Image (cartoon, grey):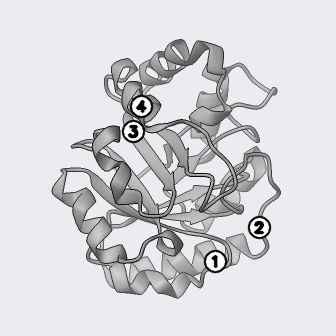
C-alpha cells in the first residue's frame, strides 16, 4: 500500500483554513492532522475543542487525524464530537489508564491510535497490539513545529515496524515531526505508512500546496 498523507493544519494558512482544507480534500489527501494541546502535557496551545469539532464542516472525504497532547484526553472527546471516520491519537505518557482511553475511542466508532514520545521506549506498544489501529511515533518532542529530528528516530521507527510485523496485526505506523522531503523517504524505507507533513515539506516554501502534495506522494509511494 502506498504511503498516506496527513498535512498538519497548524502549519497551514490560518486565515484561509476552509479553502486549504477543501483543497486538500479535492487532492485526495487521506487525513488532516489536527493538534490539540492543553498547555500542561506540552507547554503550548493550538486549537480548542470547538475548533477541532468545526473542521468537520469543511471535510467531505478527508478524515480527521486528531492528535491529543493532553492529560486525561477522554474528557475532551464529547466536545470534539469524536465519531466514526476519525483517527484519534492519545499519548502513552498522558493517560492514567491507556487501555480504557483506547476502548473509549473505539466505542465511539473512531480509530484508536497510541502516540509515543521520543524518550519513551518503543517496546511499550507491545501491550496494546490488539487495541489500536495505528501507532504514532513522535520524531520530535511534542508541542512545537519546526524542530530538528530527535536522535535515533529512524532506529526507533525500524524497531516499531519490526514489532508490528512480528505481531501479524494490520497496524499502521504514523510519523510526526520534521517529516521533510529528505526524511520522508528514509521514514518510508523504515516502515512508516502515514506522514504528518508540515513546515519542513508540504507547508514549506519550495512548492505551492497542490504541487507539494503531488511531490510528497511520489516520494512515499
Relative to 127, residue 84 above or below: above
List the residue tagged with mark 2: 150
- Disc assigned to residue 50: 4
Nearer the observer, disc 1 or disc 2? 2
Left or right relative to 3: residue 171: left
Labels 3, 1: front one: 3
Mark positioned earlier in the residue sequence (2 or 4):
4
Specify the label residue 64 is tagged with: 3
Secondary structure at badge 4 equals: helix
Q: Considering only order in the chain, which callout, 2 or 3, is on the residue closer to the N terminus? A: 3
Front disc: 2 or 4: 4
Q: Nearer the viewer, residue 79 or 65?
A: 79
Quarter of the view holding residue 101? bottom left
- Gap between marks 2 and 4 measured at Cα: 31 Å
Q: Residue at 29%, 55% (x, y): give it.
A: 111
Q: CA distance from mark 4 to mark 3?
A: 14 Å
Which residue is the site of mark 1?
Answer: 156
Residue 131 placement (x, y as % from top left): 27, 72
Amino acid at each position: 500500500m502506498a504511503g498516506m498523507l496527513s498535512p498538519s493544519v497548524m502549519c497551514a494558512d490560518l486565515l484561509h483554513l476552509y479553502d486549504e482544507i477543501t483543497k486538500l480534500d479535492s487532492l485526495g489527501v487521506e487525513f488532516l492532522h489536527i493538534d490539540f494541546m492543553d498547555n500542561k502535557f506540552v507547554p503550548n496551545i493550538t486549537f480548542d475543542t470547538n475548533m477541532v469539532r468545526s473542521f468537520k464542516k469543511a471535510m467531505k472525504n478527508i478524515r480527521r487525524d486528531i492528535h491529543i497532547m493532553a492529560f486525561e484526553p477522554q474528557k475532551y472527546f464529547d466536545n470534539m464530537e469524536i465519531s466514526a471516520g476519525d483517527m484519534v491519537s492519545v499519548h502513552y505518557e498522558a493517560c492514567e489508564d491507556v487501555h480504557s482511553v483506547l476502548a473509549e475511542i473505539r466505542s465511539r466508532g473512531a480509530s484508536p491510535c497510541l502516540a509515543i514520545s521520543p524518550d519513551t521506549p518503543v517496546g511499550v506498544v507491545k501491550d496494546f497490539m490488539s487495541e489500536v489501529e495505528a501507532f504514532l511515533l513522535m520524531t520530535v518532542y511534542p508541542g512545537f513545529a519546526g524542530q530538528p529530528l530527535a536522535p535515533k528516530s529512524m532506529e526507533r521507527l525500524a524497531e516499531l515496524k519490526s514489532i508490528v510485523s512480528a505481531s501479524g496485526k494490520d497496524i499502521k505506523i504514523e510519523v510526526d515531526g520534521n517529516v521533510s522531503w529528505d526524511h520522508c523517504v528514509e521514514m518510508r524505507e523504515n516502515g512508516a505508512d502515514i506522514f504528518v507533513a508540515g513546515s519542513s515539506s508540504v507547508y514549506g516554501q519550495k512548492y505551492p500546496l497542490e504541487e507539494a502534495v503531488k511531490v510528497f506522494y511520489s516520494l512515499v509511494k
